[in-house]
Image (cartoon, grey):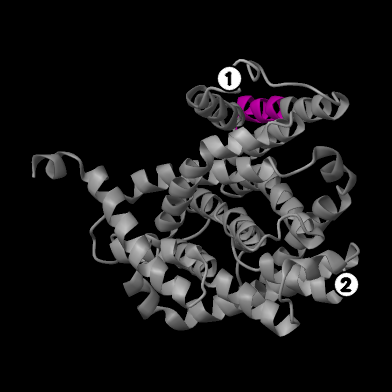
């Protein structure tokens, strides 16, 4: 009893694992992805469910490790030269998609007489898709190496980069301009990242430090993998850039050094655990009572977001060279609102751009779109007649 009383975090880990196994077994029987089990576990155990785990801030912090590991792993699957060759699709595609989202919100806001700063913030919010959900689903379905999978991942990564100017603009809208020192830090960080990418591109062949010495030492390989993954994340976070973006660049460096196999073996178990906790932390944000009281407006917003995001992204992907079938599937993959939107909404709330009600509303909407996303993607695949990853290479 003393162990339980003095270690509530230990109890939390055990309870999350038990609920994930129970719910996950049921969903696996129904042929649904494990992401849904993670989110439902958070709903059941969180402060808006059975109140078994109430320290959701600690869970959120641990969950961020999952996002970092997820981006590091996908970075290890990306060939940097090929990624650079296809820069037009993610860069211009993401910019057009953000402008389209703001325009869509602007039409709604014009009808309801919203302020322009609210329209811009909400446009930013719905324009960001979920790297965590989409990349996990692509990997689970063996689609991350397909043409449409690579295009979608590229768009997601550019979105992660553009979160920085979005947060700066949001701060300005709230009347709080970022400090000059912060802007300089971000510029220096961006230059360093670009320098690393250029170095990797020009250096055709290189080895990681100490890689030869630890090639047969699994314990040292684990620590080396952690240093590379979280070291790049810490570096970018220091410069006020996305930690997940730094982890992704670290993964690409590992891929270029041809060391992905032992990195993957060293960190795979950590990734499974922390990614599960990340999605559980999303589920803990869903306030059931608020959802019941405001279900009509929530349902309307989610429907508008999914239809709008789906077709905006499909048009963007189609314009840059995919056929309609693959474009519509890509639109479905990017239709949800992503986890980085929580950061935009929180910034807007503390800058007093949005009210407490709008803040609670957006938190529930973002969380529910993440929960619904696997069903939406699966339904789209069935409607389009896509049955296996090989079909996705025909774009």
> Seen in the image, is 45 located left or right of residue 107?
left
Q: Which residue is mark 2?
A: 323
Q: Is residue 188 above or below residue 328?
A: above
Which quadrant of the structure image shows residue 69? Answer: top right
The residue drawn where x is 21% and y is 45% is 8
Q: Number of marks in the image?
A: 2
* Left/right of residue 132 with respect to residue 110 in the rendered view: left
Q: Nearer the viewer, residue 210 or 320?
A: 210
* Marking on residue 381: none
266 vs 101, left or right, is left
Is 194 included in the stretch rendered in magenta?
A: no
| Residue at x-position 57% and y-position 46% | 70
Question: What residue appears at the point 67 percent right and 66 percent down from the top-left corner?
Answer: 333
Q: Nearer the viewer, residue 160 or 247?
A: 247
Q: CA distance from mark 1 to mark 2?
A: 47 Å
Q: 325 above or below 85?
A: below
The magenta segment = 177-190
Which image quadrant is residue 4 in? top left
Can residue 127 be seen from the camera position used here? yes
Q: Earlier in the sequence, mark 1 or mark 2?
A: 1
Residue 23 position, x and y percent, is 37, 69
Task: Identify which residue is drawn at 68% across, 78% down.
Answer: 380
For marks 1 and 2, give the one nearer the viewer. Answer: 1
Q: How many residues crowd mark 1 within 10 Å: few (<14), some (14–19), many (20+)?
A: some
Q: Identify residue for label 1.
A: 214
Asked if one can make out residue 103 in the rendered structure from this viewpoint, the answer is: no
Q: Secondary structure at mark 2?
A: loop
Determine whether 71 is above or below 184 in the image. below
Q: Position of residue 188 (x, y in %)?
A: 71, 24
Identify the image quadrant of residue 395: bottom right
Q: Position of residue 153 (x, y in %)?
A: 72, 54
């Amino acid at each position: 009893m003393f162990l339980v009383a003095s270690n509530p975090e230990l109890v939390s880990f055990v309870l999350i694992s038990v609920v994930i196994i129970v719910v996950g077994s049921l969903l696996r029987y129904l042929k649904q992805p494990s992401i849904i089990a993670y989110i439902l576990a958070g709903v059941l155990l969180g402060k808006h469910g059975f109140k078994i785990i109430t320290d959701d801030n600690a869970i959120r912090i641990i969950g961020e490790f999952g996002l970092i590991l997820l981006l590091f792993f996908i970075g290890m699957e990306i060939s940097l030269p090929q990624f650079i060759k296809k820069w037009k699709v993610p860069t211009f595609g993401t910019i057009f998609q953000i402008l389209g989202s703001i325009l869509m919100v602007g039409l709604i806001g014009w009808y309801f007489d919203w302020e322009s700063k609210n329209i811009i913030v909400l446009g930013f919010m719905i324009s960001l898709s979920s790297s965590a959900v989409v990349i996990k689903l692509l990997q689970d379905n063996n689609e991350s190496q397909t043409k449409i999978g690579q295009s979608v991942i590229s768009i997601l990564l550019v979105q992660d980069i553009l979160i920085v100017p979005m947060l700066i603009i949001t701060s300005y809208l709230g009347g709080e301009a970022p400090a000059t020192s912060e802007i300089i830090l971000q510029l220096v960080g961006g230059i360093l990242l670009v320098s690393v990418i250029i170095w990797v591109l020009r250096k055709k062949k290189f080895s990681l430090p100490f890689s030869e010495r630890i090639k047969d030492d699994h314990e040292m390989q684990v620590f080396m993998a952690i240093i590379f993954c979280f070291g790049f994340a810490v570096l970018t976070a220091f410069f006020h850039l996305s930690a997940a973006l730094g982890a992704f660049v670290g993964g690409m460096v590992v891929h270029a050094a041809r060391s992905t196999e032992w990195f993957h073996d060293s960190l795979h178990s950590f990734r499974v655990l922390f990614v599960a906790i990340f999605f559980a932390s999303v589920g803990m944000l869903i306030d059931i009572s608020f959802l019941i009281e405001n279900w009509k407006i929530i349902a309307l917003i989610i429907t508008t977001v999914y239809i709008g995001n789906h077709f905006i992204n499909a048009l963007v992907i189609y314009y840059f060279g995919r056929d309609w079938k693959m474009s519509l599937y890509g639109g479905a993959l990017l239709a949800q609102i992503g986890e980085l939107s929580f950061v935009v909404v929180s910034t807007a709330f503390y800058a007093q751009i949005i009210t407490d009600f709008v803040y609670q509303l957006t938190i529930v909407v973002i969380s529910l779109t993440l929960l619904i996303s696997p069903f939406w993607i699966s339904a789209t695949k069935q409607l389009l007649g896509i049955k296996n990853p090989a079909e996705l290479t025909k774009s």
